[in-house]
Image (tube, grey):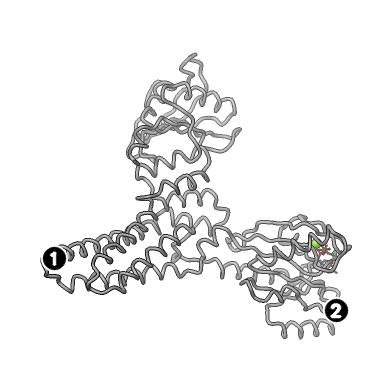
Amino acid sequence: MLQEVSKSSATIFALSSGRPPAAIAVVRVSGPAARLALEKLTGRVPEPRKAALALVRDPRTGEAIDQALTLWFPGPGSETGEDMAEFQLHGGLAVVAATLEALGRLPGFRPAEAGEFTRRAFVNGRLDLTAVEALADLIGAETEAQRRQAVRQLRGALGKRAEAWRSRIIELQALIEASLDFSDEGDVPADLVETVLRGAGELEREIRQVLADGGRGERLRDGLTIAIAGPPNAGKSTLFNWLAGREAAIVSPYPGTTRDVLEVHLELLGYPVTVLDTAGVRMSDDPVEREGIFRARARAAEADLVLWVVDATADGAGDCDLARRGGADQGSVWRVFNKADLIDSDAKRSALGEMKSAGDRSFVVSALTEKGLPELLAALGDFARDRLSAGDSVLITRARHRHALNEAAEALGRVAARGAAQEDLIAEDLRVAAACMGRLVGRIDVEDVLDAIFRDFCIGK
Ligand SMILES: Nc1nc2c(ncn2[C@@H]2O[C@H](COP(=O)(O)OP(=O)(O)OP(=O)(O)O)[C@@H](O)[C@H]2O)c(=O)[nH]1
Ligand SMILES: [Mg+2]
């Protein structure tokens, strides 16, 4: 099936670099007639993998379109596994349009669909499915930690491990098949089955170890959410703007200024964090403000961390009505006593006393003078690192991976728990485990997930 797809393929082409105008535009061609693109547009095919300067002409009119660098990557050693050609043009709109139009007129050529180059690389065995996903993550990576994780995955962190597990499962399958043959002859070597049971137990343990990562890899893809919440006029938007590094939210002395939930995306110590500014929480008769408060509570309840900002000079400043959420979620709540510039030393002392009695972490800051804000920012960075840092140990970056590994571990667990006389059932569970690993790297049974994965790619990739 997979081979069929690649053989019947048209020759595809697309602008693979960013939107023109730009300094350079890269147009890629992949497929059986890729060589024709170079012959027809430039009159010659350069040496494989060596850039050559060439005049690109419209084959129909002979008119020069641009002077470009051209490259020739014969398959199967190319990125897609097919013959590939590349034109590095000057990145003008008209240059790119004329080149694409000329390519489109060649026989058997058509524009590439989104992700089609990568799809061909997968179909031709140049990338396994975890690497394809990693490529999408790499293109989407906004922070250092996300980029590192994507590169690790692209280089086969999970793919190679899953392949190794798969071949060990297949070895166990071979052993159990052998013992089934023996049993026909009424002579089952007991230690053969023992070896299989032990091997399955070891594999299960290894896989479960990888599964016990607290979901860090998946979380790193999405990033953490930190919600700023608290009573009106406490200085939430002032703090939000400081974190954002710009006047993203309206600040005013009037309570009830912020209504909608505002978002900024930050990189803290290289980790992706979304910070939310929300409406001040109070009783209100204004339907618009009530809706804002409703949204504030909903978003704060889902956040990984709530910064509960209060006016340190106000009565009952330590009270946080989100803290009474009943602990249904894992989100932490930190108290931020703002407007510290307004309190005299006595009041400050009492605020500090209150801080100590509160169970969560607390900070005394002034969003106006910026006192205490660097300390708060450092603590937020530590929080992000704590929740997201994976090191090299995390292999799972998607729910799909977790699902396949879980299923494999369960099947192997069933094997390990069986007795020697159950070879048939053992063989079946091993088949299930091997199939899970095969699905993980995209060896079998993946048609349904392919569309979902390649849909995320852009055209030209
Ligand atoms: N003295 C002092 N004033 C502050 C400080 N932080 C904010 N303010 C002032 O407090 C007022 C309210 O600030 P905002 O940031 O709009 O408060 P908010 O919590 O977003 O208010 P709502 O959106 O209405 O809930 C503004 O006049 C700010 O200038 C601070 O640390 N010290
Ligand atoms: Mg506000």
Note whether ligand 1 is within 8 Å of mark 2.
no
Front residue of 451 and 334? 451
Marked residue nearer the N-terminal end (1 or 2): 1
Q: Position of residue 448 (x, y in %)?
A: 44, 47
Q: Residues within 10 Å of mark 1 (few under 14, many from 20)?
A: few
Q: Which residue is mark 2?
A: 315
Label 2: state its secondary structure: loop
Quarter of the image with the N terminus is top left
- Tell me: 111 left or right of 48: right
Question: Which quadrant of the frame does ligand 2 lie within?
Answer: bottom right
User: Marks 1/2: CA distance?
Assistant: 82 Å
Q: Is label 1 or label 2 in front?
A: 1
The reply to whether residue 7 is visible in this rendering is yes
Q: Residue 194 bears which disc, if any?
A: none
- Does 37 appear above or below 120? above
Q: Is residue 72 visible?
A: no
Which of the labelled discs sits on residue 182, or is there none? 1
Which class describes the residues within 10 Å of circle 2: few (<14), some (14-19), or many (20+)?
few
Picture coordinates of residue 422 (x, y %)?
A: 25, 70
Residue 364 on image: x %, y %: 75, 76
- Mark 1 lies on a secondary structure that is helix
| Residue in front for this viewpoint, 90 or 270 | 270
Residue farthest top in this picture: 61
Q: Residue at x 15, y 67 (%)?
A: 183
Q: Give the residue drawn at x 81%, y 85%.
A: 350
**Type of the residue with mark 2:** Asp
Q: Between residues 243 and 226, which one lies in front from this camera angle?
A: 226
Q: Is residue 157 left or right of residue 354?
A: left
Is 188 situated left or right of 246 in this image? left
Identify which amino acid the numbered label 1 is placed on: Phe
